[in-house]
Image: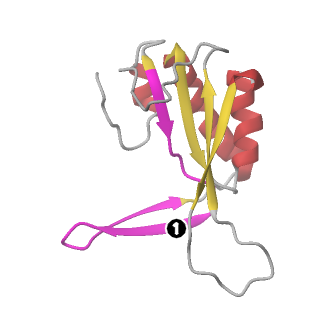
Amino acid sequence: MINKLILGDNLEILKTLESESVDLIYLDPPFFSNRDYEVIWGDDGEIRSFQDRWAGGMEHYIAWLKERVEQIYRILKPTGSIFLHCDWHANAYIRVEILDKLFGAGNFKNEIIWFYHRWTNVSKTFQKMHDTIFWYGKMQNAVTFNKNGELPF
């Protein structure tokens, strides 16, 4: 499998992949927003919807995500990296309860802040206008990084 994009719940597919066989994984899981979403795309006005609701609260969400990140850790090469996209709803829990525990705090490489603009409202607080992408490597000082943007595969 080379340069394959998989859309959907990745757990069963991850379990079938060979250990230490993947260079890079970008993960964009549900954000624990406790909302329902309807997205319209396609010329025919196709509507797809999904729920980001977790009956068991944060503990259930973290357990669900941790199971997947454990498989990701298993399939990453020693020089591999994970980029996990999240927002303010659970980013602190994800970093401390999942990524630091599985990869080790010393394998935290960086935090990418994805800043975006949206219409401002009258509000009594600062607006939440960014997402976070955590970058962890599997092994300390073993990650491939090409500052010229060249991919290692």
The C terminus lies in which quarter of the figure?
top left
Reply yes or no: does residue 101 show up in magenta.
no
- Pinpoint residue 104: horizontal percent, then vertical percent: 73, 22
Q: Residue at x 69, y 22 (%)?
A: 107
Figure coloring: secondary structure
In this image, 61 relative to 10: left or right? Answer: right
Q: Residue furthest left?
A: 44
- Secondary structure under tag 1 reads strand
Q: Residue furthest front?
A: 148
- Pinpoint residue 110: horizontal percent, then vertical percent: 66, 35
- Nearest the viewer among 54 and 23 is 23
Neighbour tally class for label 1: few under 14, some 14-19, many 20 plus, Cα within 10 Å: few
Magenta residues?
23-51
Q: Which residue is mark 1?
A: 36
The N terminus lies in which quarter of the figure?
top left
Name which quarter of the figure residue 150 lies in. top left
Q: Residue at x 30, y 31 (%)?
A: 4
Please determine whether, in this image, residue 139 is positioned above or below residue 32: above
Q: Residue at x 42, y 14 (%)?
A: 21
Please determine whether, in this image, residue 126 is positioned above or below residue 86: below
Q: Residue at x 71, y 87 (%)?
A: 122
In this image, 58 relative to 113: left or right? Answer: right
- Pinpoint residue 109: horizontal percent, then vertical percent: 66, 29
Is residue 128 something one can see in this rendering?
yes
Q: How many marks?
A: 1
Magenta stretch prevailing secondary structure: strand
Reply yes or no: does residue 24 show up in magenta.
yes
- Nearest the viewer among 21 and 55 is 21
- Nearest the viewer among 63 and 109 is 109
